[in-house]
Each structure stands twice: as structure tokens, then as C-alpha cells.
Amino acid sequence: MSFEKTTLEMIAPTVDEAISRGLNQLGLPREAIDIEVLDAGNKGLFGLGGRQARVRLTIRNEEDELDDLPVSAPVKSAPAGENKKAAVADEESILEVSKSVVTGLLEKMKVHAQVTAKYVQPDSDEQQPTVMIEIKGDDLSYLIGRRSETLNALQYITGLIVGKEVGHWVHLLIDVQGYRSRRERQLRQLATRLADQVARTGRRQTLEPMPANERRIIHLELRDHPQVTTESSGEEPNRKVTIILKK
């Protein structure tokens, strides 16, 4: 299973401080991160006109790094043909592991919040149920970050650890204070409005850069539209969706 690389940009008075802040937010050691200095900053003349340092931290996603993640004894999934009771027990175990992992990561980040985990049924029988982890508390907007980068990083790390602990990949989503559901509604409304505009004027519309999960919402919302279609272009993390007329 391949994972899209997750990046986080940090700004601070110095490069070292920006890196330190980023590592603290991600809860990862420096060895697990690729670091790119975007702007080394400048103190300015006599302290005036200075510019802060800016760095980009990219989480490495090579499969061999999974062995370096802290794990407990793996929970084996129920073998084929085993009775339904065992399968239910396995699902409950995955929920407990997922909740425990997120709770532990938040504690390391010194975040006080309530964590719950449940299954969300897929839209079609071909997809597997999704583990939805909800985080609630007071003023948790910093857990979302710019363009949901911090939230996506937390979700990515959680997925790696949970998959290692239970012995197989688990499809999961993490939401903070209902952010993802609100964002999905906004994206669906935006997609519909821009699609109508493209159909009316014939001029393509390109949306702002979005992470893969948000681009997917746009694609799904317009996949059955009679007049327009969608395509993605660009490189991460600046990949965008364009809405165009069907030929």
C-alpha cells in the first residue's frame, strides 16, 4: 500500500526553531522527516526589516520505516471462515487500537481532548468500512492547520501505527470538532456552483490546491454531471482540480 507524502511548513525566527516546532507538532523524531529550508530568514539591519525562517517538513513514507514505529503485539485479523463473533471481536479490537493510538499521540503533543472511534459504512459494497476517529475539545483549530496539513499528518501517522499493530492496513479518517464534515459540505457546494458556471460560460475553472482526500470529494460530486468533467494537475502539495466542459 503506497501513501501520499504529508508535508508541514513552519515559520520561526530561526531554521532550528522552525524545525523543532514542526517535529513537536508531528510528534516524530528528526530521522523520520525530510527537511527542506525554504527561507533561511534574515535578521535585518539593526533588527529592522527582518524575515523569519521557513522550512518544509516531509514525512518519509518508505515501507521499511514502519519497523521503526513504536508498536505493541500485533492483533491478527480473523481468518476466513471463522465465525461472525470472532470477526466482530476483531473489529472492536481495531477500534480500541485506533482510539488508543490517537490518544497517545495527543498526550505526547500535550493536547487535552476527548477521542472516540466508530465505524462508518461505505457508499458501496465494494469498499470496506472506515474507522472514523473524532477528536473534541476546546479550541483545537491548531490541530487542523493550514489547508488541514496538521490534521492530515496526524491521520497519516495514526494509519501507519494502527496498520502495524493490527497486522494489516486499516482505512481510517480523523476529524476534529466536525471539521471534515463541514469542509465536505463546503466543497460539494463549491463544486456544484463552479460546475454550473462552467456549463453556462464554457470557461474552465481551476480550484485552489487541495490534499488528495479533498480533491476526491470534488471528483465524486461531479462524476455524473451531464455537462462537465474534472481533472487533477500539478505536483504535491500544490495539486489542483480543474472543472472543464465535456467534449
Image (tube, rainbow, N blue to C red):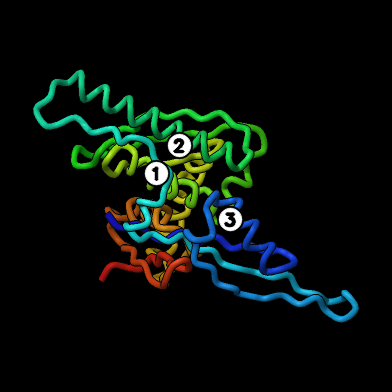
Residue at mark 1: 161
Badge 3 element: helix
User: Which quarter of the rendering shows the C terminus?
Assistant: bottom left
Front-lying residue, 187 or 28: 28
User: Which quarter of the rendering shows the N terminus?
Assistant: bottom left
Q: Give the class, few, some or many, for how many residues have Cα within 10 Å of label 2's Cα (few <14, many ≥20).
A: some
* First in residue order: circle 1 vs circle 3: 3
Quick one: which residue is furthest to the right in this view? 46
- Is residue 148 shown to the viewer in this render? no
Spatial distance from mark 1 to mark 3, Cα to Cα? 17 Å
Q: Give the class, few, some or many, for how many residues have Cα within 10 Å of label 3's Cα (few <14, many ≥20).
A: some
Residue at mark 2: 101
Badge 2 element: helix
Q: Compared with residue 28, is residue 203 higher up or lower down, i.e. above or below?
A: below
Query: Which residue is rendered at x = 20% and y = 18% of the image?
Result: 85
Indicate left or right for 13 with 200 as reference: right
Q: Compared with residue 53, is residue 71 higher up or lower down, i.e. above or below?
A: above
* First in residue order: circle 2 vs circle 3: 3
Indicate left or right for 155 with 125 as reference: right
Q: Are the two marked residues, 1 and 2, in contact with CB atoms closer than 8 angstroms?
A: yes
Q: Quadrant of residue 82?
A: top left
Q: Could you tell me residue 153's position as x and y percent?
A: 49, 52
What type is the residue that disc 2 sits on? Answer: Val
What type is the residue that disc 3 sits on? Answer: Leu
Indicate left or right for 97 with 140 as reference: left
Query: Which residue is rendered at x = 31% and y = 41% of the image?
Result: 170
Residue at mark 3: 23
Q: Could you tell me residue 181's position as x and y percent?
A: 47, 40
Front-lying residue, 241 or 120: 120
